[in-house]
Image: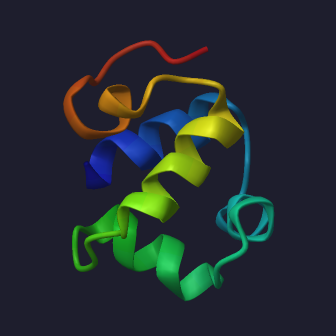
Amino acid sequence: MANCIQDIRLAKKLTQEELAKAVDVTRATIIALEKGNYNPSLELAFRIANFFKIEIQKIFFIKGDFR
């Protein structure tokens, strides 16, 4: 999951701060997610998926082209 969130964020040309504000968490939370040091709640995972307009399973399982 960690690398998937970072891959998606970078493909969308967003900073960690921009993503954090969009999903109502701190930048530190995004950093921890991207490093794999934090497992998000289901609610947060859905907020991230909704923000990126992708299915939630893409956050957890799929790496690749997210443009």
* Above/below status of 4 relative to 23: above
Asked if residue 49 lies left or right of residue 4, the reply is: right
Which residue sits at x=54%, y=23%? 54
Residue 61 is situated, as x and y percent measured from the top left of the image, at: 20, 30
Q: Quadrant of residue 64?
A: top left
For this view, does 33 lie left or right of residue 62? Answer: right
Q: Is residue 10 above or below residue 32?
A: above
Report the residue that reaches farthest toward the front. 43
Q: In the image shown, does 64 or 58 lie closer to the viewer? A: 58
The percent coordinates of residue 31 (x first, y second) are 46, 75
Please say if 29 is above or below 10. Answer: below
Observer-nearest of 6 and 44: 44
Query: At 69% across and 69% down in the image, what residue appears?
Result: 20
The spot of residue 36 in percent (x, y) is 22, 68
> Which residue is painted at 30% across and 47% down in the image?
3
Residue at x 63%, y 80% (from the top left corner): 27
**For residue 60, side relative to residue 67 (left or right):** left
Q: Quadrant of residue 58?
A: top left
Residue 34's place in the image compared with 29, above or below, is above
**Image label count:** 0
Tell me how the rendering is colored.
rainbow
Quarter of the rendering occupied by the C terminus: top right
Which quarter of the picture shows residue 56?
A: top left
Q: Would residue 34 be found to the left or right of residue 54 on screen?
A: left
